[in-house]
Image (cartoon, grey):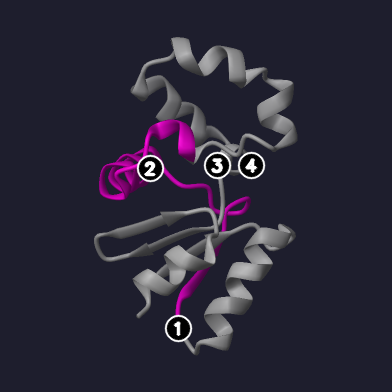
Amino acid sequence: MKFICYPKCTTCQKAKKWLDDKGISYELRDIKENNPTEKELREWYKKSGLPLKKFFNTSGLLYKSMELKNKLPNMSDDEQIKLLASDGMLVKRPIVVDGDNVLVGYREKEYEELFK
């Protein structure tokens, strides 16, 4: 299982603590140091069943400074994926990739469901 996060992000820290407390092992990946590729993002998007918009870190400074709230509705999926792959700080985190399961963000209920 991969746990993709930004170590300074408090939500990522909560999710990591939850996994650690449950004794769940994972491969840690810093999203800023090792940004997801277009190929990975396409695969995760497909497996997650989520709208592509959910992969954007809408509360991030970069998202706001680029005014993506106004630009995303006019962008194709391809353009959005290329943009996400350009900078890890645009990507919502943490991301858990476990086989065919992909969780974006941290909601304890979803983690409990996945790791029953």
Dividing the picture into quarters, in which one does residue 9 lie? bottom right
Q: Which residue is mark 3?
A: 91
- Amino acid carrying mark 2 in the image: Leu
Q: Position of residue 28 (x, y in %)?
A: 53, 70
Asked if residue 85 is positioned above or below residue 14 in the image, the reply reads: above
Mark 1 vs 4: CB contact within 8 A: no
Tell me if label 3 and label 2 are in contact, CB under 8 Å: yes
Q: Secondary structure at mark 2?
A: helix
Residue 94, how many percent across, how many down?
55, 57
Which comes before the other along the chain, label 2 or label 1? 1
Location of mark 2 (residue): 41
Query: Which of the two discs, 3 and 2, labels the residue nearer the N terminus?
Result: 2
Q: How far is mark 4 from mark 3, CA to CA? A: 5 Å
Q: Does 44 sit above or below residue 72? A: below
Q: Residues within 10 Å of mark 3 (few under 14, many from 20)?
A: many
Quarter of the image for the N terminus: give it. Answer: bottom left
The answer to whether mark 2 and mark 1 are in CB contact below 8 A is no
**Label 4 crowding class (10 Å Cα cut-off): few <14, some 14-19, many 20+?**
many
In percent of width and height, residue 14 lies at: 65, 69
Splitting the image into 4 quarters, where does residue 69 fall? top right
Determine the secondary structure under disc 1: loop
What's drawn in magenta, residue-wise?
25-54
Question: Which residue is rendered at x = 28% and y = 46% of the image?
Answer: 43
> Does residue 45 belong to the magenta stretch?
yes
Instruction: Please tell me which of labels 4 and 2 falls first in the chain.
Output: 2
| Nearest the eye: 70 or 79 | 70
